[in-house]
Amino acid sequence: MCHNSLPKPDESSRNPVFSDMQTIKRRFFAMRNGALAAQMRAGGLVYKINFGLNLPQIREIASEIMSWNLPDDSQCSLAENLWANTTTRESMLIAPMIYPTAIMTPHTAMQWACQAQTTEIADTLCHSLLRKLPFAGEIAAELLSLNSQSDMTRYTALRLWLNLLVSGLADTDGLEDAACAERDRSCPLTRSLTRQILDEIDFLKSE
């Protein structure tokens, strides 16, 4: 079997979801890059299990999974199982790449947004999935309004807002107020992101 492709698992296997998961995990293992994983750790990006795949490699695997043409409910279950595998970096990064946007609910979107563990996962979640949802703006606003939100959750909300802003899908007036409030918090995690949002708003106003 060619190691450069990801064939669809045999439908007669004892458990289709488990078989899919095992096939994907074997692909992660075959493409592992210990040097890149070590470099991430040295840079402060720590995961319990990190195969060291780069994002283009993960997108390649996601594209191959999409070529399996699984029914939406099966693909949804696979994505949810991958997302639930919180110990593995690549599992949480690939999950939003394959989740069927047509059946993502606001409740699940909020759950995933609140469960993003790192900025890398939050960035991928927002870019690959959340920004494509018809209720993305409502999710971003609700995330910022949560009384118990962590800095990571605020980061995810602002990242989603920035994605919507550059796509012309965000209300700049309300967003500018939220970004200014976040800037005044002087949070190290969100500082750069807040600056990007305010710079983008200034650019749009100058057009």
Image: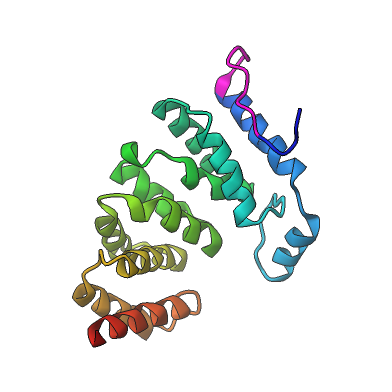
For image coordinates 56% across by 21% down, the residue present is 16
Inspect the magenta stretch and tell me whether residue 12 lies in it.
Answer: yes
Q: The C terminus appears in which quarter of the rendering?
A: bottom left
Q: Answer above or below: position of 12 versus 67.
A: above
Q: Is 109 displayed left or right of 124 in the figure?
A: left
- Res 188 visible: yes
Our reading of the magenta stretch's main secondary structure is loop
Where does residue 131 sit, x and y in percent of width and height?
A: 35, 56
For image coordinates 39% across by 67% down, the residue present is 154
Q: Quadrant of residue 199?
A: bottom left
Inspect the magenta stretch and tell me whether residue 91 lies in it.
Answer: no
Where does residue 62 sit, x and y in percent of width and height?
A: 55, 42
Q: Quadrant of residue 120?
A: bottom right
Look at the image and give the residue range highlighted in magenta. Answer: 6-16
Q: Is 190 displayed left or right of 2 in the figure?
A: left
Q: Answer above or below: position of 25 versus 36.
A: above
Q: Answer above or below: position of 18 versus 188.
A: above
Where does residue 203 sit, x and y in percent of width and height?
A: 31, 84
Q: The N terminus appears in which quarter of the rendering?
A: top right
Closer to us: 171 or 63 = 63
